[in-house]
Amino acid sequence: MAVAASTVNGFSLTPVSKADENYHRPTDLKAFDDTKAGVKGLVDAGITEIPRIFYSPPENFNSDDVSSETQIHIPVIDLEHIDKSTVDRVREASEKLGFFQLINHGIPVDVLEEMKDAVRRFHEQETESRKQYYTRDLTMPLIYNSNFDLYSAATTNWRDTFGYISAPKLHNPASLPEICRDILVDYSKRVMEVGKLLFELLSEALGLNPNYLNDIDCNEGLALVCHYYPQCPQPNLAIGTSEHTDNDFITVLLQDHIGGLQIRYENKWVDVPPVAGALVVNIGDLMQLITNDKFKSVKHRVLANKEGPRVSVAGVFSTLSFPTSKLYGPIKELLSEDNPAIYRETTVRDFSIQFRSVGLGTSTLQHFKLSEADT
Ligand SMILES: O=C(O)CCC(=O)C(=O)O
Ligand SMILES: [Fe+2]
């Protein structure tokens, strides 16, 4: 039997039908967080109306805003035979859309399937077992929560997530939950290899030595961010992931067959259709910064869906808040009198802290722009 959202796990979550004056967002956010059961917990409780905290602004549901143009396709790049045309396609996609898909990337289909299964297994295990990993403490080996920016973002997303930092090495894999341990370790190694190859292709696409981006350690850090988007009873009111750009060098994303990922191109939302066996690659803010805007970190979002769960695994190439003193600024070889530096130098840590402090949807890059007075 369906129950009202107000009684989920004994906590008061204001149901949507209540009048505005009864709604106190911070209280409801805390009540939701304290359940430690995530959005999955609400769905398990049988809600038929989404709690008010998940209401997304109506402008997110403007159908005029969605591209009907079939000519905009996210390129699918085949790595079976890599040659100059591969580099040209990577360059074109990175400059224009900031997104492309990869096939024949070297990760076997059964590994991709097992990785997606492990994400489902983790989120679908007994609630009591899952709860032990629920935390906002970034020093934990595995961080499970709903909405990393729950208390800072304007919109709460219909999504739960667990994350694991695989590089630079921090934790003993033995401290990871057994339910997903082996595949997290295996999949991370394989994504590292794909990343190394991608940084070579991106270096060449920039006209640099193929080792350039690996030599400056763009591949030093990798986090796996494993999303679970439960089915949503009112997908026209909530959003799976708010529009944002990624605060890393690149993201290598594995998505399942459900769909819902969209990118912002020429003021329209364009679907990134699921392609069996493919990985989605996108340029992050740090790559846009070091390429001085040549490669674009493009806004994207994920719609909530009646169908679900949807799972995805974002391989985030960044050392995040890991302490490091290395500075990243626009690559000197790419600059000229006509193309002066637009951004100041930053450590990856400062860049990440700025991103986390504002939450999804606010531009981190803007904060690192040189002002007129600096140039
Ligand atoms: O779930 C997805 O497809 C995308 C998630 C995403 O954009 C992210 O983790 O940055
Ligand atoms: Fe993203």
Image (cartoon, rainbow, N blue to C red):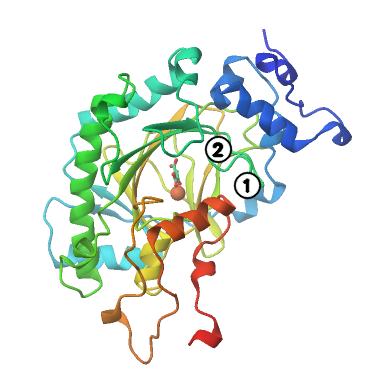
Task: Say what secondary structure mark 1 lies in.
Answer: loop
Q: Is mark 1 within 8 Å of ligand 1?
A: no
Residue 95, percent across and down?
36, 69
Residue at point 76%, 25% (across, down): 15
Mark 1 is surrounded, within 10 Å at the Cα level, by few (under 14), some (14 to 19) or many (20 or more) other residues, namely some
Relative depth, front residue between 170 and 332: 170
Would you say residue 113 is visible in this rendering? no
Question: In the drawing, does residue 2 fall left or right of residue 73?
Answer: right
Q: Toward which corner of the image does residue 25 lie, by quadrant?
A: top right
Question: In the drawing, does residue 234 fall left or right of residue 162?
Answer: right
> Amino acid type of disc 2?
Asn
- Residue ID for mark 2: 147
Q: Mark 1 touching mark 2, by CB under 8 A?
A: yes
Relative depth, front residue between 222 and 102: 222
Question: In the drawing, does residue 100 fall left or right of residue 305?
Answer: left
Q: Toward which corner of the image does residue 75 lie, by quadrant?
A: bottom left
Would you say residue 359 is visible in this rendering? yes
Task: Say what secondary structure mark 2 lies in.
Answer: loop
Q: Is residue 98 above or below residue 59?
A: below
Task: Report the Cα–Cα distance between label 1 and label 2.
Answer: 9 Å
> Amino acid type of disc 1?
Ala
Residue 183, percent across and down?
25, 28
Which labelled disc corresponds to residue 153? 1
Q: Toward which corner of the image does residue 51 lie, by quadrant?
A: top right
